[in-house]
Image (cartoon, rainbow, N blue to C red):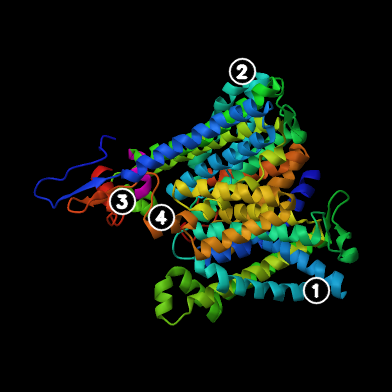
Amino acid sequence: MIWANVAIQGMLLGGLYALFATGLALVFGVMRMVNLAHGDLGILAAFVALFIIQSFGLPLLWASIVTIIIMFLVGYVLQRGLLNRTLGVDDTRPIVVTFGLSIIIQNALIMKFSADSQGLDAGKIENISVKITNQLSIGWFPLIVFVIAIAVIAALQFFLARAKLGRAFRATSDDREAAELMGINNKHIYSLAMAIALAIVAVAGILLAIRTTFDPTQGSFRLIYAFEAVIMGGMGSMWGTLLGGIVLGMSQTIGTQAFGAGWGLVVGHLVFLTVLAVRPSGFFAKTVTA
Amino acid sequence: MSTPDVTTPPEAAPAFRIARSTRIHKYVLAVSVLIVFLLAAGPFILQFVNGVQPVSTMRNLVTLFTLLALAQMWNLLGGYAGLISVGQQAYIGLGAYGLWLLGDVLHLHPFVAVFLAGLLAVAVALPVAPLIFRLRGGYFAIGTWVIAEVVRLVVSNIQATGGGSGKTVISAARLPIDTRITGTYLLALFVAVGSILLVYFLLRSRLGLALTAIRDNDLAAQSSGVNVFRSKLLVWVIAAYGCGVVGAVVAMNLLRIQPTAAFTVNWTAYMMFIVVIGGFGTIEGPIIGAVIYFALLQSLSQYGTLYMLLLGIVAVIMVTVAPKGIWGYVAKRWNLHLFPVRRRLVFESTPPDEDPKPAESPDAAVAESA
């Protein structure tokens, strides 16, 4: 029974990983750009929420909504003002610039908030759980995180499939020049994609901050887990990313249970590397590696 | 490769030849030899004059030399092979632990162990290459980071390597202090000069031509008969070895190896920022970048966090405004190349010293000899 419990914990954790991964996958899908600061931007969102709560005394829910809006705007401005300039020449520039951003965000957060661990308090929801059998109980909060992850991914999938703007995203992704000829402003589309990606990663960052403690250096790990979820799931498939996140989360919790605290993360990475070796296009590949 | 430095075209062709060296390169060679000689002999001269070893200067210069060598390796990967890595800390850390393994466990002399320690890095870099080479661009970069994380986690979790608290390199610590400091200094200088020469001769070799072709268009290179995978693999392994040796020199300088510090992604930040600021895809760039980085470090190192923040900002601005870095600007402005790795068309009617317009790109030569 302990294993079922561990597996369920891992699955729920995977939902959070997938939520971090969604924005990374969206940005790569639309403009073939890998944002190495993605994890740090999620952690930045958590600190923004913390700052709003501490400075203005807003309740967590309102602070979160304000944070999501702020990160949406940050995403648009960041892409429009800086990242668009790095695209289209070679792979190197966006990598160096986003890696530089990652270092900037981490060190700025350390200067402002110190390197100490912080937490966001959501009240008693964090500690209550639903009991299924005597040995098996599921925390309400991890369950809520998982449901939010599914809802966000479903909404994004629906948006990409049905909305007019979503069609523009897909058109730009398929053929940048043709989309431009049809009157789509690629720079605007890219900036909106980054805005949506950062709004989603803000949700992920805040949920992470409620679930566990966070500190300025956490972003790198979030990026790596998100990347593993995207690659395992198969690029271009949001539901694949969710599955990738779940596989990663379960590998980590089961690995920890089997081999001890230090080895769970290693098992997660090894499962990723195995998938990369055996099925490099992931579980549900739709687009080819650019 | 058998292509000589100067090739004479068939008689019917217009009067030109393909040249690499110009007169300036003779001066560069002379000045470089002088600088290296001064750096090598300097501590001994100072010790003779003052009676004491200039220990802190030597330690600082070891930092400069190791950063320079690391930047050359990162630039070899990113600037020439198109492999942007954010995971070279894996091989730096492995080199550091390699020094401990070979010196303390297998009882080799630490000065010998430094060069063999790089092989431990190669032992990891080689098998992971086929895996992460499946990824491209930014995803390749994160893939290298995953490997670095796995290595860090494994080393921190194993009791034999001292777990999270790490190891002291006792074999190096037991050397007489003068021998150790002098030895580390000369090793670091050797590694720095060696990294420059290594990249220089690699670029002039057949592999260098292949790399240039791959960097410009890997599909075209492949269809011209360049083995893209093998060329990239070779560079990947060479860079891992270089980073490993540097890691061992760093461990010899500090005597203490700790997994969080040995495998920190900050190594990547140093390398990347040095190369980007100095000049991407040139041999001169990392040298200039390392000197600038080192000079700033001397005055700003007490503000560690602020220093990294400023460096990140400078790197981001550099890439967006002047993506070729300081040396890229200098080279373009004065058409100056200190290392004769390029092939240029020299028309016989113009005296070669006036530096005639260089060939548009080295591709013409690539097509001939690759």
Residue position marked by numbered label 4 in the rendering: B331
Q: Mark 1 points at which residue?
A: A63
The CA distance from mark 3 to mark 4 is: 15 Å
- Tell me whether marks 2 and 1 sit on the same chain: no
- Indicate the quadrant containing the C terminus of chain A: top left, top right, bottom left or bottom right: bottom left
Quick one: B243 or A17, which is closer to the camera? Answer: B243
Q: Is residue A181 above or below residue B338?
A: below
Q: Is mark 2 on a helix, strand or loop?
A: loop
First of labels 4, 2 by sequence position: 2
Q: Which residue lies furthest to the top in this view?
A: B107
Q: What residue type is labelled 4?
A: Ala
Amino acid type of the residue that numbered disc 2 sits on in the rendered structure: Leu
At 82% from the left and 55% from the top, the residue drawn is A117
Q: Which residue is rendered at x = 57% and y = 58% of the image? A: B315
Mark positioned earlier in the residue sequence (2 or 3): 2
Amino acid type of the residue tagged 1 in the rendering = Ala
Contact check, label 2 and label 1, Cβ < 8 Å: no
Disc ID at residue B362: 3
Chain of the residue on which disc 2 is drawn: B
Q: In this view, does B213 lie to the left or right of B233?
A: left
